[in-house]
Image (cartoon, rainbow, N blue to C red):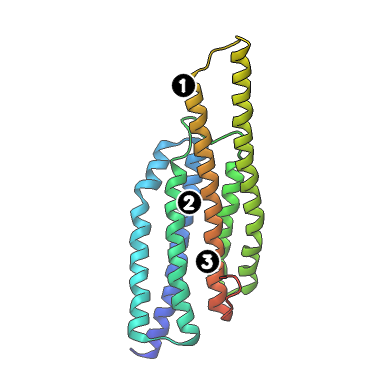
Amino acid sequence: MPRENYQQRLEDLRAEVVSMGDLVLERYDAAVEAAETGDDDLAREVIEGDYEVNDRYLELEEECTELLALQQPVASDLRLVTASFKVITDLERVADLATNLAGYGGDEGGLHPAVDFREIGDEAGEMVADAVAAYEAGDPDACRAVAARDDDLDERCRQASEAVVRDLLEADRARVEANRSGESDPDSEELAGALDEVSRALLAVRDLERVGDHAVNIAARALYMIENDDELIY
């Protein structure tokens, strides 16, 4: 293959990875909106549209494989191709998490009063967007900045999970005390509903934390691509 065509394929690969990132973030934002508002139609659109992300992933996986097998890139070109393959893998997993998140919203929207789902979700999504932008621009400082934000996201997720469990325990204690005093009888449907709300909230928080982890993975691979530096990988 002429050198010009080879370089163009590398440039096209980077552009297509960024385009996949845009698609995934579009689906992710829709998933957060669906969970926050309880929009069943939007949730269904996110879930049923996941095939488009999967198709894009398979196309780019094939392109990476062909470049590795047929062109045998070395040095920075090799890092670009291998990093791109890792980045699309993380993006595909963010899309999978988006399908989970889309289905967590209750009938009237929201997950649990103790969780600021929108704020945490937006922060995790911004980390992914910034990591993809760092990959596109070849910006090592931006890569490190994304990784540095992960501890804060993890802490917010931890606090949210603890708040959900604490709220459940307090509500259960109140029900027990009310039952003992004869003020009310246990309501199995109400308890089941509360447990379902807690379960969905905890799963959602876990998945948001994982979105942040994938953002760090993308930033780590981008940094390796840019500077041959694996400090964020291990």
Residues at marks 2 and 1, CA–CA distance in whole angstroms: 32 Å
Seen in the image, is 214 located left or right of residue 43? Answer: right
- Amino acid type at mark 1: Glu
93 over 225 or under it: above or below: above
Task: State the image coordinates of residue 137 (x, y, percent, origin top left).
Answer: 56, 73
Q: Is residue 141 above or below residue 77?
A: above
Of the numbered discs 2 and 1, the one sitting upstream in the chain is 2
Tell me if label 1 and label 3 are in contact, CB under 8 Å. Answer: no
Q: Give the residue type at disc 3.
A: Ile
Question: For the residues carrying marks 2 and 1, which lies nearer the camera in this image?
Answer: 1
Q: For mark 3, what is the residue?
A: 218
Query: Could you say which quadrant of the image residue 89 lies in?
Result: bottom left
> Regarding mark 2 in the picture, which secondary structure is present there?
helix
Image mark for residue 189 = 1
For residue 28, the mark is: 2
Rendered position, 173 above or below 47: above
First of labels 2, 3 by sequence position: 2
Q: Quadrant of the N terminus?
A: bottom left
Judged from this view, the residue extending furthest toward the top is 182
Type of amino acid at the residue the image marks with label 2:
Tyr
Position of the C terminus by quadrant? bottom right
Image position of 134 (left or right of 60): right
